[in-house]
Image (spheres, rainbow, N blue to C red):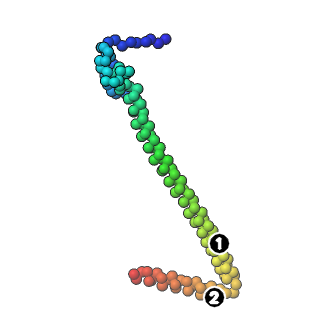
Amino acid sequence: MSALVTPSVGSVFRIYSCRGALLEEVGVPRGPGEGVPPGNYGNYGYANSGYSACEEENERLTESLRSKVTAIKSLSIEIGHEVKTQNNLLAEMDSQFDSTTGFLGKTMGKLKILSRGSQTRLLCYMMLFSLFVFFVIYWIIKRR
């Protein structure tokens, strides 16, 4: 059961924001036209009611939330583009590693064939030559 409360003449009402802060104290008009802005006779001096203050605060918070959501949306789109780019780079690296693995496998197979045959002297010369080349490169780098 709800009761209807009628304010008495000269009463003071306090209007609070949604968070409990005092916004305004409004007095009930004592007579016709008292406390009412000119041309605004319909609201009896309650121009800044608690409802409109809550609406203004809600609008401000809604706009703040909208800007944060927009920022997060653009950030997530950028992250998606970065993930796609990284996936493409990984796929390219995978194919390059596969081709390198195949190349090294073929080279090792050829070296095994060389080591089994009577061409061990040729293999020894190749190893000495490569060791000499690496030594020369090391010496050049060391001199700089």
Position of the C terminus by quadrant: bottom left
Identified at 37% across, 25% down, the residue is 49
**Amino acid bearing label 1:** Gly
Amino acid type assigned to the residue bearing label 2 in the image? Arg
Q: Secondary structure at mark 1?
A: helix
Looking at the image, residue 96 sits to the left or right of residue 133; the answer is right
In this view, 117 is above or below 89 = below
**Residue, disc 2:** 121
Residue 19 in sight: no
Asked if residue 59 can be seen in this view, the reply is: yes
Q: Estimate the x, y position of residue 89 in percent, counting from the top left.
A: 56, 63
Q: Is residue 102 above or below residue 115?
A: above
Q: Residues within 10 Å of mark 2 (few under 14, many from 20)?
A: few
Q: Is residue 110 depicted above or below 4 in this figure?
A: below
Looking at the rendering, which quadrant does residue 50 occupy?
A: top left
Q: Nearer the viewer, residue 64 or 20?
A: 64
Q: Quadrant of residue 93?
A: bottom right
State left or right for residue 79 relative to residue 107: left
- In this view, the residue in front, 81 or 112, is 81
Q: Which residue is mark 1?
A: 102
Q: For this rendering, which residue is in front, 73 or 91?
A: 73
Q: Is residue 82 above or below residue 136?
A: above
Comes first in the chain, label 2 or label 1: 1
